[in-house]
Image (spheres, rainbow, N blue to C red):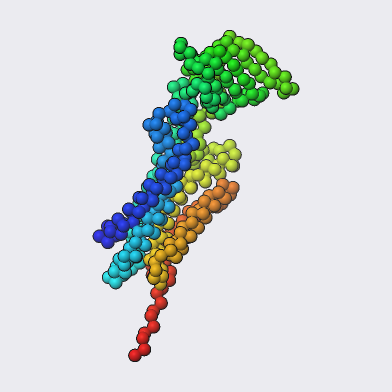
Amino acid sequence: MKLLTRYLFRQLLAPTLLALVAFAGAVWVSQALRFVDLIVNQGLSVLAFLYLTGLLVPSLVLVVLPFAAFIGALAGYQKLRAESELSVCRAAGLSDWQLAKGAMVLGSLFMVVSLVVSLYVMPSAYRHFRTLQHDLSRDVSAVAIQTGVFTSLTSGLTVHVSERLPSGELGGILVHDTRRPHGAVTLLADRGDLVRGATGPLLVLREGSYQERARDGSLSVVYFDDTTVDLTAGLEDDFDRALKTREMFLGELFATAAVAENQRQRRLMLVEAHERLSWPLVSLALPLLAAATVLGNRAVRDGGWRVSLLATAMAIGVVALTLTTNNVAKNDLALLPALYAVPLVAIALAVFTLLRGGLVQPVPRPRAAA
């Protein structure tokens, strides 16, 4: 890498990394808030919570990589332009294409990183995330029942405990269960305890009543000496066999599509596979568009918001068209080539602009009359 290219690359890399951390952090916080109940209601430690939500970071980074590269390239070249460094380089005989090599290196680097994350890191992390989430839902130590508080242990199951007895058992237990297909039931028990079962945590109730309201409105009450409530009933039982598309590696996606039971599943698998391969191209297209817009608008002397607005509008257009094509391709596989065509056309237009010498050529000043 030549000295000038290394210098330009460093000028673009710093704002890119800053934007990447800011974007990824903001998106991570919005996603992590969904799992705060694991700390509040299930007694998950802060370190375990950070580890669990940290497994979502690769999928978040994959989304924000192109935007970070675009912001870094746009901010870097605007800074060089404002400090007249681009003018000095042009005066030394450097072309726009030579000045854009910094963006080319940055985009190529992020494209490779995006490809690695897309094909290996993201499916590995998300598969581990779902495995850990599955294990936590079936771990007695993760079930924290607070006295005097209505606690939702799983979807459709609410438990209230009045006190903890000196023996370590739970006292004054109310269980409201809406997971049953024939209607909701309410169980009241004097005491009970959490135990580990074959499939997960069980709540053993002793000396209580089982109340169920029939469809005609009548209430039936059955008294029991002891009974058991499965806290994992209704959860996914085929976890190990039913992988989601985000968990699958590229080969698994194509293999599943080949033996798909219906056309809809086949389309989803193929679109996911080709999206993994085509999305990294956006990480190259956006910084090149930023470079082409800034370097190609020599006639704009203020170098301010007009150039940034134009570059941002083009970047949003590329991303929006890519996402729209992805959604439409789920219904028509004939549009799969368009997943690659959109970023490749953007790259070609940016390269053509840089080789041509700009979008807007400077207007020569009229000579003063003698």
Q: Nearer the viewer, residue 160 or 157?
A: 160
Identified at 38% across, 80% down, the residue is 365
Does 231 sit above or below residue 110?
Answer: above
Looking at the rendering, which quadrant does residue 236 occupy? top right
Q: Is residue 92 left or right of residue 266?
A: left
Question: As rendered, which of 312 and 90 lies closer to the eye?
Answer: 312
Along the viewing direction, whichever of 307 and 99 lies nearer the viewer: 307
Q: Is residue 27 left or right of residue 79?
A: right
Farthest residue toward the left? 3
Residue lying furthest bottom in this view? 370
Q: Tell me if residue 356 can be seen.
A: no
Q: Residue furthest right?
A: 216
Image coords of residue 361 (percent x, y): 41, 73
Q: Position of residue 123 (x, y in %)?
A: 44, 39
Q: Position of residue 112 (x, y in %)?
A: 37, 49
Q: Is residue 291 above or below residue 245?
A: below
Tell me how many marks there are.
0
Residue that appears at 66% across and 24% down: 183
Q: Quadrant of the C terminus?
A: bottom left
User: In the rendered image, which quarter is residue 262 located in?
Assistant: top right
Question: What's the residue at 32%, 53% (across, down)?
Answer: 14
Residue 369 in view in this figure:
yes
Q: Position of residue 195 (x, y in %)?
A: 48, 16
Q: Is 264 displayed left or right of 120 in the figure?
A: right
Quadrant where the N terminus lies? bottom left
Residue 84, compared with residue 153, is above or below; it is below
Residue in the foreground of this view, choosing between 270 and 79: 79
